[in-house]
Amino acid sequence: MASATASGSGSKGNFNMVLFYVFLIGFVLVSLFPLLWVFKMSIVTRSDLFQSPVTTLVAPPIADSYNTIFANPDFRRALLNSTIIAGITTIICLFFGAIAAYAIARLRFRLKSVVMTTILAISFFPAVAIIAPLFLLFSKVGLINTYWSVIITDVVFALPLTIWILVSFFKELPKDLEEAARVDGATTIQAFRKVIVPLAEPGVFTTAILTFIFAWNEFLFAATFLFDASTQPVTVAIPNFATVYTVDYGAQAAASVVVTIPLVILVLIFQRRIVSGLTAGAVKG
Amino acid sequence: MTTAPREKKRGGWLKEEFGNPERRTAYYMVLPALLIIMIVAVYPVLNSIWLSLHAATITATGEFVGFENYVEMFGNDDFISGLKNTVIFTVVSVFFEFIIGLGIALAINRAFRGRGLVRAAVLVPWAFPTVISAAMWRLMFQDQIGVINYVANGIGLISEPILSDATLLLIGSILVDVWKTTPFMALLLLAGLQTIPGEVYEAARVDGANVLQRFFQITMPLLKSTILVAVLFRTMDSYRVFDLFWVMSNRQLESLSTFVYQGVRISQLQFAQGNAAAVFIFVTAFLLALFFIYGLGMQTSTED
């Protein structure tokens, strides 16, 4: 289909090209609009915010809203909590996920399709179906209001993603190297550690980013198991700001921007890798 | 000769699997991840089913009541409206995400300047925490300072504030979901399109096939498996919608998931009904996935 328009020549081709770029710009603007608009809301004065008709251009930008939220210890705490929860979840997922994915990608065993089906089933699993029993269980063992309650559940729901992406990365690595290592007398585990892990680094890194984003964005478990500001991540804390800063919409906007910026930076830097990681499983699968 | 080896094989395949060092290692490597998943996901499901059959409260399992919780649940208006909203939300948003996503994928399936920028822009909404995008859009839908409410009101599209009308809230949620996940759909479909070799189109063109014929007879059939995977992922995701409804409507809009959450976590007077709804979501989601995989012939094989 692409070649049908690309082969057009002369003025018709130019016109198509212009149309194509207009379409692209529109598409990019729609994607970015909310972030830009909310960013604008976060740097204007209170009176500008309530102005009607809605203003588009900003007079001198001000940082008041940012000062407000960073002065709030709960917000700073929430940022730290999110980082801890997402960071530990990512490390645990990569550890268990890499080991399992290697076996699935490289070794032969009978129950492989059963294992993959189970993993796939979990990624479709409605998490809300298990929050009540988990709440009871975690209460019994004293995990409620601790990071671990959320880390454990996040790991379970992020692992399928981690394994799925890592399997597709591991499959692409050249097989000869491990065989050479085996011939030299290395065991499966040694071949994995000394040959595969260093080679797979880019894939593992991409998987780490995706797992981190998944855990950073998680809301349901955090909202269920954590009800104290000392452990709540940003996803739980920020909606609460709607009641804390009732009419201070600038502060609400600033909080949203702060939480999103790290993700936007990650995405901008690693967009190529992220796309290959996201699409690997779905297209080849 | 025909039966003897078979007997031996059937009796000893476990032994054979674990006797082989490579295979044994494979099982040891997969086991930790599987165990974690099983313990945290499977046990609670069984427990949910058990609780849903009792007059359970947050502190005690209570007496066995059979399917009474389910009967009460179906008589509960909140549950019915949650079910209705979830089904409408899933069908409408996945439909638009697919149509728009496919259009975008077809349009950008070529080499052009600024490709990286487009790809990055596309990923931004996807990377947003759903809760945060819900909060952002809520600010834009807001009736005092919200730009969308302002514009929609200005051109006479709405007669009352978006955030105080249930239908407008549902439409708004669909809009936000389409905004957030269409890019993801487009990326998946684009990756699928890129696996179709250009020669196929050339050959069809030589044979005189027009654009529409090429689309329906080459693109669609070759893209079928990618489409099914993408639509299945999005359907399962939309079906369990929680964050978006909860935050954007400030708990006004009911979905199946918010009904469960409300029951087991907030009100707790409806703990038993909440559990029944949890089992309902689990079972229907399972059937939905089966329908995609067996009914539509989706391939989930991961063997090379």
Image (spheres, rainbow, N blue to C red):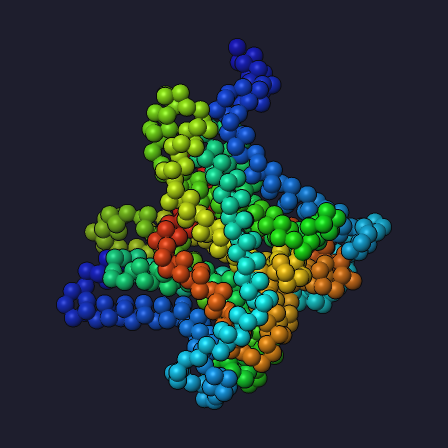
Residue B41 position by quadrant: top right
* Residue A190 in view in this figure: yes
Left or right: residue B89 compared with residue B107: right
Residue found 68% across the figure and 46% down from its top: B44
Pinpoint residue A31: horizontal percent, then vertical percent: 40, 68
Count of marks, rendered view:
0
Depth check: give the residue in front, A124 or B147.
B147
Depth check: give the residue in front, A225 or A44.
A44
Quarter the C terminus of chain A occupies: top left
* Residue A282 in view in this figure: no
Depth check: give the residue in front, A68 or A227.
A68
Depth check: give the residue in front, B254 or B22.
B22
Residue found 40% across the figure and 58% down from its top: A267
Query: Residue most toward the left?
Result: A10
Left or right: residue A142 compared with residue A242: right
Residue found 66% across the figure and 51% down from its top: A130
Pinpoint residue B279: horizontal percent, then vertical percent: 68, 52
Pinpoint residue B248: horizontal percent, then vertical percent: 57, 70
Query: Residue most toward the right?
Result: B63
Residue found 41% across the figure and 57% down from its top: A266
Pinpoint residue A22: horizontal percent, then vertical percent: 29, 71
Residue B122 position by quadrant: bottom left
Query: Residue most toward the bottom?
Result: A52
Quarter the N terminus of chain A occupies: bottom left
